[in-house]
Image (cartoon, rainbow, N blue to C red):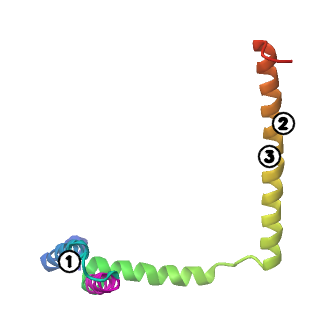
Amino acid sequence: MNTQAEAQTPVFDIVKQVFSVLLVVAGVAAFYYFSEVSVLYRVIGLLVMAAVVLGLMLTTNLGRNTWGFFLESKQEVRKVVWPTREETTRTTMLVFGMVVAVGFILWLLDMFLFWGVRLLTGQGG
């Protein structure tokens, strides 16, 4: 297939996407319209509507490409070399230590600047 034919979105896919958006809007509107009904039933209805929309979107080219992206991302996460518990603890303690040190330095700087401004303005000594 040539790239121009692949780049075009079939009309039926566009219709499905627009219908999906309309279903989401209808589901949210129904959630608020039936406010006298129990929240549990309204949430269940909203979740069912979301599942229908998700299923409908997965039948489009955009949905299949997005699903493929998520599957590839899952495979890439498995390839990540995660740090050990000891490395994570050490790094966390280092970050906490640096936050305390920088906080103390900023506090000292603020204290001396405040003292200097009070001395310059004659409000204390």
Residue drawn where x is 60% and y is 84% of the image: 78
Q: Give the side of residue 113 with respect to residue 76, left or right.
A: right
Q: Nearer the viewer, residue 68 or 106?
A: 106
Q: Residue 108 carries which label?
A: 2
Q: Label 1 sits on what residue type?
A: Leu
Question: Real-space Cα distance between discs 3 and 1?
Answer: 52 Å
User: Magenta stretch?
Assistant: 40-53
Q: Give the side of residue 4 with respect to residue 117, left or right.
A: left
Q: Label 3 sits on what residue type?
A: Val
Mark sitting earlier along the chain (2/3): 3
- The residue tagged 3 is 102
Q: How crowded is mark 3: few (under 14 residues within 10 Å), some or many (20 or more)?
A: few
**x%, y% of residue 101?**
84, 48
SS state under label 1: helix
Q: Majority secondary structure of the magenta segment?
A: helix
Q: Residue 115 carries which label?
A: none
Q: Residue 23 carries which label?
A: 1
Mark sitting earlier along the chain (3/1): 1
Answer whether labels 2 and 3 touch (C-beta < 8 Å): no
Residue drawn where x is 77% and y is 33% of the image: 110
State yes or no: residue 49 in magenta.
yes
Question: Real-space Cα distance between discs 2 and 1?
Answer: 59 Å
Mark sitting earlier along the chain (2/1): 1
Closer to the observer: label 2 or label 3? 2
